[in-house]
Amino acid sequence: MRKIGILGLGAIGSVMSRALVAHPENEIFYYTRTPKSKIKIQFQNKKIEIPIDSKKERSEELDWLLICLKEYHFETAKEQLVQLIGVYTKVVVIRNGIELKAPITPFTTDENILECMIDCPTQPIEDNYYLQYRKPILKVEKSKLAKRFRALFTKNDVQIIEVQDYKTENWKKLIESSALGSILCLTGRTCSVFENPEVIDLYKDLLREGIEVAKSNGAIIEGNFESEMLDKIATYSKTKGSSMLSDRLTGNIIEVNAKNGAIEKVASQNKIATPINDTICKLLRQINQN
């Protein structure tokens, strides 16, 4: 049996748990700050409950650890990471942002860490359930470790895409999600807000700033990326929200540093002017202070 730990049982940790328990060779260990007795997910009109024992003991080190924490949780998770990451433990980091390996390198070697992007719209609903809208799509860098990661799942539970240029794919997702998410968060509106041409212009400006910063960081962004993003928002339902909007509406901390703040940081390092994104960051941080 493969011993797999999941650290963080929010929306993404719950989704990954549902996928991993389906494989008969996986033994799952759950680690969470908030005590839970079960994971509750609604998927394809079916309600699923996964009993968990967060105090379950293990006699050997974990083969794998999936870290599903938000960026702002890492600082307080250091002691736990020391306990959970063994010499041979493979670590998968699934969260928003870029440079996902950085907080983990003090605890293991670079070769043992796999950065992972996830596309799986999920939101909390009544009775502590998470509503999962579709099968998770995971993007990882093409490698031997990625192939071993793929083997943890049954074929139909997730879609895993291995990419040659992970940095570029990571930046594309960051640019898109930070531009859209911050606009929805600050306006308190769903994608219906894009009916206003002035909001679309703001979205374009944020995309362009993000693209310039991404290129300065070595990402290869094609010339048609901006038009693709504009075509994409035109297809969205007017009721579509974002994780940043959800966090604001539910009173949770907004992931500024993993989204617009990540662009702000690299822009500052590479001396790229991003006045609009900088203003967005100030406003988002003010919301968090409130």
Image: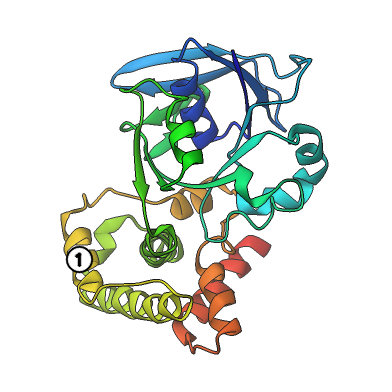
Label 1: few (<14), some (14–19) or many (≥20) C-alpha neighbours in 10 Å: few
Residue 154 position within the rendered picture, expressed as x and y whole percent measured from the top left: 38, 20
Instruction: Give coordinates of residue 104: x percent, y percent.
Output: 69, 50
Residue 88 vs residue 139: left or right? right
Q: Is residue 208 visible?
A: yes
Residue 140 in the image: above or below residue 59 = below
Up-down relation of residue 66 to residue 107 (above or below): above
Q: Nearer the viewer, residue 71 or 237?
A: 71
The residue under the point 64% across, 51% down is 110
Q: To which quarter of the image does residue 207 belong?
A: bottom left
Query: Residue 176 sits in which quadrant?
Result: bottom left
Total number of numbered discs in the rendering: 1
Residue 237 x %, y %: 21, 49
At horizontal 78% and vertical 47% (from top left) the residue drawn is 76
Residue where numbered disc 1 is placed? 228
Up/down of 26 relative to 9, above or below: above
Residue type at the position of mark 1 = Glu
Q: Secondary structure at mark 1?
A: helix
Viewed as shown, does residue 109 lie left or right of 178? right
- Nearer the observer, 220 or 66: 220
Q: Nearer the viewer, residue 188 or 108?
A: 108
Relative horizontal placement of residue 227, taking residue 115 as reference (left or right): left
Quadrant in which the C terminus is drawn: bottom right
Q: Quadrant of the N terminus?
A: top right
Residue 179 percent coordinates (x, y)? 39, 67
